[in-house]
Amino acid sequence: MRSYEAYLRLVEDALPHALDALEPIPPQLREAMEYSLLSGGKRLRPVLLLAAMEAVGGDAEAALSFACALEMIHTYSLIHDDLPAMDDDVLRRGRPTSHVRFGEALAILAGDGLLSAAIELMLRASLGTGDLRGTRAAHAIARRCGVSGMVAGQVIDMNSEGLASDEATVRTLHLRKTADLLTAAVEAGMILGGADDETLAHGVAYGQHLGLAFQIADDLLDVTGTAAELGKSVGKDRDEAKATWVAVKGMEGAREDAQREAALAGEAIQILGENAAFFIRCAEDAVRRNH
């Protein structure tokens, strides 16, 4: 296993060239796609994918197409989430959001372009292998980012705004909107690395608990953080009466639940033995963000 920083360097080195493998993209569209894709960030999802592959005996470099594709999907979701018809946000990673910089129409197309490019990259990589691992990994990512996963979570989020929410609704929202894409990273990486079914099941459980811990911490940061610290607008969840863990459980309850979910993530990933330490630190770091 490598360090987080080593996996991050692999991702950052590969992302600027990821679109080169495709047919030529209209310059205006490519500029808008890369504006958001190359704007920095923790790259948690592609890092988790590469680490999960190596944790079960695979080679991280062989999964870079999938890691880049996953970051493209995450970026597309942020572009669309920031649109006026959705969260209507003007700041992302310390810069103007895509629709502020390029206009709504091109921002929508940039998101569409990143999603379709991600699918093409994964399928190209799958065709180059002699087994079905790539196809299974691409299916896992597509399912968890799609109409029963992340997109379903967006719908729940939209429909819950301004309404009194209960814990079950917010849990489902967080599992779909946030946890599914984090789970997809671990699941796809383990599939590509040849994990057995038991290990894969533990990886999925880890991703779900990690995603809940991560999103609960995000809900807390919307209350306690600043735009300068986070690179995005804060206070919007409260102002727009969003369905959040803080709204349901309060600040202290949310902190306790974030810690509990991080601990459950750590328990789930113990199946990896000494390689579990990397993933436990990721879960702990997700929670530390709210302090």
Image (cartoon, helix red, strand yellow):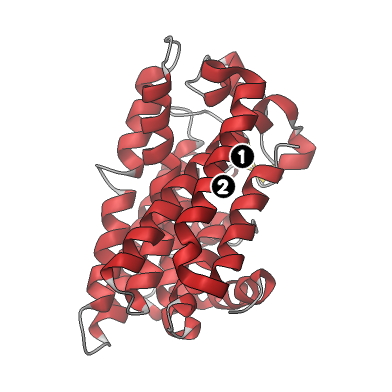
In the picture, measured across the screen, residue 55 lies left or right of residue 154, that is right
Residue kind at label 2, given as amino acid type: Ala
Q: Measuring 25% from the left and 42% from the top, which residue is drawn there? A: 148
Around disc 2, counting alpha carbons within 10 Å, would you say few (fewer than 14), some (14 to 19), or many (20 or more)?
A: some
How far is the residue under mark 2 from the one under mark 1?
Answer: 6 Å
Vertical relation: 269 (above or below) 53: above
Q: Is 156 or 286 nearer to us in this picture? A: 286
Q: Secondary structure at mark 1?
A: helix
Q: Nearer the viewer, residue 182 or 229?
A: 182
User: Decide: marks 2, 1 in contact (CB < 8 A)?
Assistant: yes
Answer yes or no: is residue 144 visible. yes
Tell me where residue 91 sits by quadrant.
top right
Name the spot of residue 56 as percent of width and height, x first: 43, 78
For mark 1, does the 10 Å Cα neighbourhood hold few (<14), some (14 to 19), or many (20 or more) residues?
many
Residue ID at (63%, 70%):
8
> Residue at left 40%, top 27%?
157
Residue 189, percent across and down? 40, 70
The image quadrant of residue 101 is top right
Question: Would residue 22 be found to the left or right of residue 88 on screen?
Answer: left
Q: Which residue is mark 2?
A: 263
Residue beneath disc 1: 259
On the question of residue 99 being in view, the answer is no
Q: Nearer the viewer, residue 31 or 192?
A: 192
Res. 166 mark:
none
Residue for point 56% across, 62% down: 279
The quarter in which the N terminus is drawn is bottom right
Q: Quadrant of residue 62?
A: bottom left
Image quadrant containing the C terminus? top right
Q: Tell me if residue 186 comes above or below residue 180 in the rendering.
A: below
Q: Amino acid at mark 1?
A: Gln
In this rendering, the answer to whether 174 lies above or below 170 is below
